Amino acid sequence: MSRSYECIVVGGGLAGLTSMAYLRKNGISALLLEKREKLGGLVETFWHQGFAFDAGIRAFENSGIVFPMLKDLGIDFSFVKNEVSIGIGKESMALQGKESLVQYEAMLARLFPMERESIGRIMAEIRKVMGYMDVLYGIDNPLFLEKMDPLYLRKTLLPWFMKYQVNIRKASKLQEPIGEYLRRFTENQALIDVIIQHFFEDTPAFFALSYFSLYLDYTYPLGGTGKLPEKMAEYIREKKGEMRTGTGVVKVDPESHTVTLEDGEVIAYEKLIWAADQRAFYAMTEGAFGEKFQAQKRLVERSRGGDTILTVFLGVEKDRTYFQERCGSHRFHTPSLEGLSTVSFSANVGEAKDKELFRYTEEYLEKTTYEMSCPSLRDPSLAPPGCTGLVVSTLFSYDVVKRMKDLGVYEGFKEFSVKTILRVLEESIFPGFQEKVRFSLCATPLTMEKETHNYQGAITGWAFTNPTMPSEDRFKKIANSVKTPLADVYQCGQWTFSPSGLPVSILTGKLAADQVKKKR
């Protein structure tokens, strides 16, 4: 055994980096282990032929968490406002404040004139949830306040906490899948589809409707999203924290308080924070640790990962003005009004032939909703002069891509997907741009699985379709989400709490570090 640490953190995404930062801030000897060669997980920027692309998350929602965390750690770098727009068919609008809902309602009413009354009721629900969000994220999260000013406690925090308790109860009641929830207001499935098909399957109503607030909260770091893990890593190094990349864990032994690395090295810990895929943890943890541990292990093993994405990265010889006029820096674009409910298989995916898979892929890509991002529209240095990098992604089935791989047509599938997406975009929003595409790169759900080591390439942890969620999903109980059935093992990140995103990963990372400090 080479060394021993007060705490070992496994996983170098934002949750693991947050835990590591706070462990070192509190003087706790700690080692971070990351299987990939690069830190950041789903927060990453890469360069290709002079273009910068955000490989994972496209922008940050603060949610009263990201900026307070940076301030608390003394990490400073520049952000710009990230404006979001929505396009449906030939219609489009920018979200620039709560008043934008009036424009959104009018746009939907023009597209679905027979549904004006239903659309009005749906907008009322969105406004109700936005009211909850104003309270829930109305102040900086107090978890990141190192010192509590008595006046702030009395005048701000306590009144907010009382409102928080009321609103969190109201929000917690909106757990019904968003598709089912909207069917209370309309039977028009196409209308429901264009509102929700950029959300994960069976997304809870509150989480889905809250996004109209979160879009207004989006910011973008100059230099790309990858600047955040870079700055976090710099802070950890300044605090003399040890981090090893390209170092995978293959065994966890809670009885001896050790982890074994891929090269056979054994390292001891007093506390362990697991900030990686929860399935991997239970697969490599040996020993019989009681029924609670075994029950959680069984639940994790039979649960599915959350949705994943198909992404095309394009280097385009068109200047920023071309894209600013047509999509802005960040757009959710739905080219068809038909909706994805009209797209399906006639047979089980695992038995489908390649011809049917390609037919399904083409129809899906013609009707899906795309998230489009132009990094250089926020920061001109992220693309060569006169050119623009465009990131185009959509939710896509892991099972479909895996079947393509098994049939030996994976590379053909990627080429076909790029060709189809370029055609759809040219016909709907970017006339004449195909001939200006310098290069294209395609990342599939299998790419996500390979690069992030997340089960089935999941980008938000567990699927909402699981009959029983293998993680905490009650906002009021999020502090308990970092606890595991093992006494000296904590967890954090996207597999720890559902629904999960960047703010929750950071929050649970801090909560896990606090538990280690508390039990020191």
Image: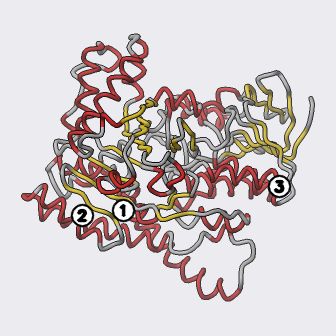
**Rendered image quadrant of residue 5:** top right
The answer to the question of whether label 1 and label 3 lie on touching residues, with beta carbons closer than 8 A, is: no
Judged left or right of residue 137, residue 177 is: left
Residue 238, labelled with which disc?
A: 3
Residue shown at 69% from the left, 54% from the top: 231
Q: Position of residue 354 (x, y in %)?
A: 30, 14
- Asked if residue 466 can be seen in this view, the reply is no
Quadrant where the image shows the C terminus: bottom right
Q: Compare marks 1 and 2 and give the one earlier in the sequence.
A: 2
Q: Confirm or deny contact between disc 2 and disc 3 (CB under 8 A).
A: no
Give the Cα separation between the discs numbered 2 and 3: 47 Å
Nearer the viewer's eye, disc 2 or disc 3? Answer: 3
Q: Furthest-front residue in view?
A: 385
Q: Are discs 1 and 2 less than 8 Å apart at CB?
A: yes
* Quadrant housing residue 478: bottom right
Instruction: Describe the element under mark 1 as helix, strand or loop.
Output: helix
Is residue 402 visible to us here?
yes
Name the residue tied to disc 1. 212
Determine the CA span between mark 1 and mark 2. 10 Å
Q: Residue furthest top?
A: 408
Q: Which residue matches tag 2? A: 104
* Three-letter code, disc 2: Tyr
Q: How packed is label 2: few (under 14 Cα within 10 Å), some, or many (20 or more)?
A: many
What element does badge 2 sit on? helix
Q: Which of the two discs, 2 and 3, labels the residue nearer the N terminus?
A: 2
